[in-house]
Structure formats: C-alpha cells, structure tokens
Amino acid sequence: MNGQNIKKAAAVISYIEAHLNEKLDLDTVANALCYSKYHLHRIFTDTVGMTPHHYIRRRQLTEAAKLLVFSEKPVMEIALIAGYESQQAFASVFKSMYKQTPIEYRQHAAFYPLQLELPLKETPTAPDEIGWEISYGVPEDIPRWMDFAALVADRFPCLEEGSHLEQVRQHIRRQQALVIRDGPAIIGAAAFSCQTGSIDFLAVHPQYRRYGTAKALVDFLMCGLFTGREISITTFRQGDKADPGQREEYLGLGFVQGELLTEFGYPTQRLILPSKQEKGDYE
C-alpha cells in the first residue's frame, strides 16, 4: 500500500470535508490541491474504493439528511447547501439514494448516513503480512467494532447505531462474530447465525477491500462453520444507485440471487451461496 497515495487521498478527503457546503467536482478539488484530475481520480479510487464523485455526493447527501432531521431549514436552502442549484435536482438525487423524497425523509425523522467522513489508516499492514488471521470477537472488541461499523456505513442502509450495538453484543456472546485485525484495529468483520445460516453483517475496511479480505471471511464460514450448508446474505437490489459495489462483490464470491425483500423499509435482495455439494468445490 503506497504511503504517498494514502497521504494524497487523505488530503482530498480533508479538502472535501472542509468544503461540503459548496459545489464540488473533480476539477475543483484537483485544482485546489494542484493535482491533475486524472491522477487524483486514480489514487483516490485505488485508496478509498470509490471515486471522488461518489464520495462527494454521498457525503453531501448525508449532511443534507442530517439537516432535514435535525434542523428546520427549508428544503431549498438545504439543497443549496448540498451543492444543488434547484430543489428538483436535489430531490431527484436524494430519492435515488435514500428511497424517500426529502420531505418524506424529514417526516420520518430517522437519520442514517450514506457515508461518514473516512479517516484513512496511514500505515496499513500489507495483506500478505496480516495473513488473514481470523478470530472470534470478544467483548473487548465491541468499541473497535462500532468504530469500524461507522467506517463501512455505506454498505448498510438504515444502520442504526443502538440497534447494531445490541446485535453485536448478542453475536459475540454466542460466538457468532469473526474479526480480522491490523494491529488493534478491526479491518474485517462478520456476524452470522448458525441457526438460520445467514450472514447478518459482513464488511471490510475500504483500504483492504481489494485484497480478498471478504473472501477470507466467507471461506472461513463455508469451510469451517457451514460445511455442507448454504448461507445467505442480503444486499442492495440490482440497479440501486446507493449500492457502493457491494452487490457485485458478493456475486463475484459465488452468491446467486434469491428473493426480493424489504428490510427496515428499505428494498433489498437475499443472495445465496450454495453448499459445496450443490456447486462443486468452492474457490
């Protein structure tokens, strides 16, 4: 992992966070930081796992959602703060990501983030040095798990901190939680149910997503805990603009499409990973 690229990506994030209330695009950020926009796009995407455009949009909409719930500012004013020139344009993009209009979201008054500020790990350990040591979570891991959950909020629509905290406690108590660490920090985690054969939480730190971390967790489950059984997981439906790429990742791991669901008012789909007997050797 290139330390210089991490510093550059962190500088991009710092600039975006300091100018969230302005109209931001790739050219603006690149010019401000004296990078070519092509260089900035490449190092940011490689480091963060999403394009600058997607990070900016998700962060600005998250801050807009916060204002809708926790302030009385008019929707038009919030649209301008989020960098949109019209309420109509803002409402269209907001609904595509939150599945509600800004007015409906304000009425429901239940804030959840599409993307929180992403603090990058300055000196991440190379994947071959970590060795993907997977262990069961313990109660002492809970604060770090919750810090980790904030980093991967983009993967979990409607994630509510208090509810998730209680679920984590239950999974750890039942020894149904797995973690991968880089030093003390959690960089990958999975919570599962032996009774239902479901993965209830599966996430990887953005800086480690392209190194097979999710596959290591799924392999551990399939080859150790769910041998001979299928497992399932829920994710974004096909075409959901809020999907940061999670659905494609799961399909790439061998999951196949199952039934359409609605969870916490959000449209999702169950994906199923067949057992070895059903699909042959799992790779």
Image (cartoon, rainbow, N blue to C red):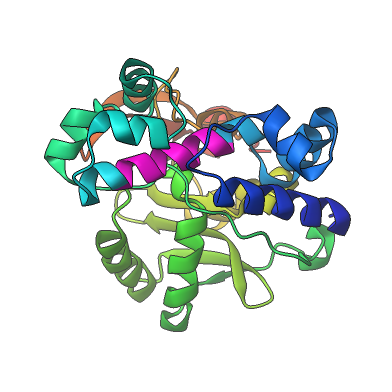
Which residue is nearer to you in this view: 125 or 227? 125
The residue positioned farthest toward the left in the image shown: 107
- The x and y percentages for residue 257 are 43, 23
Which residue is nearer to you in this view: 172 or 147? 147
Residue 185 position (above or below residue 234): below
Q: Give the residue at x 40% y 55%.
A: 192
Residue 207 position (above or below residue 147): above
Q: Quadrant of residue 185?
A: bottom right
Q: In which quadrant of the rendered image does the N terminus lie? A: bottom right
Which residue is nearer to you in this view: 51 or 24? 24
Q: Is residue 233 visible?
A: no
User: Is 60 within the magenta?
Assistant: yes
Q: Give the residue at x 55% y 58%.
A: 224
Q: Is residue 102 visible?
A: yes
Q: Which residues are magenta?
A: 55-66
- The x and y percentages for residue 114 are 42, 42
Q: Give the residue at x 18% y 45%.
A: 72
- The x and y percentages for residue 248 are 57, 28
Q: In which quadrant of the rendered image does the C terminus lie? A: top right
User: Is 124 within the magenta?
Assistant: no
